[in-house]
Amino acid sequence: MEVPLGEERIPVALPDCEVTVPEPAGGEAVDVRQAARRAVADPHGPGLAERVAPDDDVAIVVTDVTRATPDDILLDVLLSELSAAGIDREQVTVVLGLGLHRPMTPDEIRAALGEHADLAVNHDPDATVPVGSVEGCQIDLFEPVAAADTVLSTGMVEPHQYAGFSGGAKTVVIGAGGESQIRYSHGPEMLAREGVRLGRIEDNPFRAFVDAAGDLSGLDFCLNVTHGPAGVMGASAGDPRAVVADLAGTAREALSVEVADGYDAVVAGVGAPKDANLYQTTRAATYVVLGAHNPLREGGRVVIPARLPEGAGEGTGEQRFYKWLSTAESARALYEEMREGYEPGAQRAFVVARALLDHDLWVTHSQHPEIVEDCLMHAAPTLEEAVEPGSDVLVVPDALNTLLV
């Protein structure tokens, strides 16, 4: 068997261990362009041409480098539809939805957006304006989005620790939003609410907040995809809530797999682009430990092969994550301190601390083992050195796109 490491795959050789590999159904890959065109032609709610006027200024918020969304193709489809509705290319601004992640480089923008790279601007969380409030929280938006007559978005509907599944309004509200709603939605009070968990969108307070904030943002139409081991499995367009529900159903059917309890270790694959930094890589551990079903025994460990070329991560959120973890005396002390509050972006340190209360986290093959060790985790050169001989091991090759139930 193999697990991803960056853009490559490496073998898992644990001859002294009992190894189980869960196999979700996986779904079937679709042609992205054809699926996107069909979705836009048959959307949830009115078609895009009915939602725009020829003199509208249009903002399209797309995902950033941390998500493997085929934004170049999705933009092609949306721009073609806008052109047919009388919108010139010069009326469109493409906003890279960074949230508190680092700005994308020109090379990354060209790789992500192809011929549409010239339309793109990086989101700036310091250049936002208020557009209203939800649950007493001020909702701020990046100025080019707030000023647009029509707001569109792309997105990847994939399992998400808090929103249940990402995509929909989240691309705009978090990706092109200010610290206010990120602080509120990712704070300890919200994350402790019943229903805020991986794989759940129904009766999920986080998802409900994001959707309501999406209404305030003026998000008119989204084009999202979902993916699994085989590739992109489907596309959906139109009203954001319906799009997320549609694709989450596809993803659940393809990605859910029943697993037993009591494993000594889970080897959790991540791969590019998520294993670029420790902030994103730790999603694999929290998805395993804090998901619908934790398969580990008490004291079991999660082992993740990850390159980490960016170390802890270079964005504001990533640096806040690193500061909290690297200065903590213990997972317990960190968890208790962070329950009192923290800055936006630091929420990943909070959920990692929660996972570390019961389980060790090992990162192997890293370019920055010292950063891993600084953050209350363990580093090892190879998988074999991170898994104790004789262990009962669950290997999840695509941990971010597998729902353990």
Image (tube, rainbow, N blue to C red):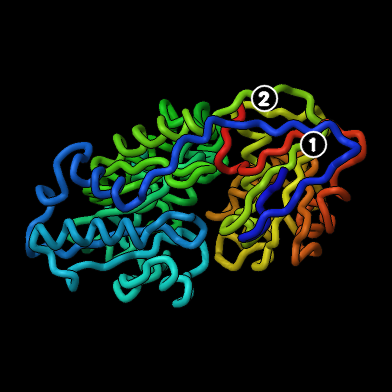
Q: Residue at x 78, y 55 (%)?
A: 364
From this view, report whether residue 216 is shown above or below residue 93.
Answer: above
Residue 265: image tag: 1
User: Badge 1: few (under 14), some or many (20 or more) residues near its Cα, within 10 Å?
Assistant: many
Q: Residue at x 14, y 41 (%)?
A: 46
- Residue 388, position as x, y percentages in the image: 90, 40
Q: Residue at x 64, y 34 (%)?
A: 290
Q: Is residue 133 visible?
A: no
Residue 119 found in image quarter: bottom left
Label 2 residue SS:
loop
Q: Where is residue 111? Give x, y as percent.
A: 44, 70
Image: 192 above or below 101: above
Instruction: Using the image, determine if residue 1 lies above or below residue 248.
Output: below
* Image quarter in which the C terminus is found: top right
Residue 259 is labelled as 2
Q: Is residue 107 left or right of residue 30?
A: right
The answer to whether 98 appears left or right of 401 in the picture is: left
Name the foreground residue: 308 vs 23: 23
Which is nearer the N-term, disc 1 or disc 2? Answer: 2
Q: CA distance from mark 1 to mark 2?
A: 13 Å
Decide if residue 308 is on the left or right side of residue 94.
right
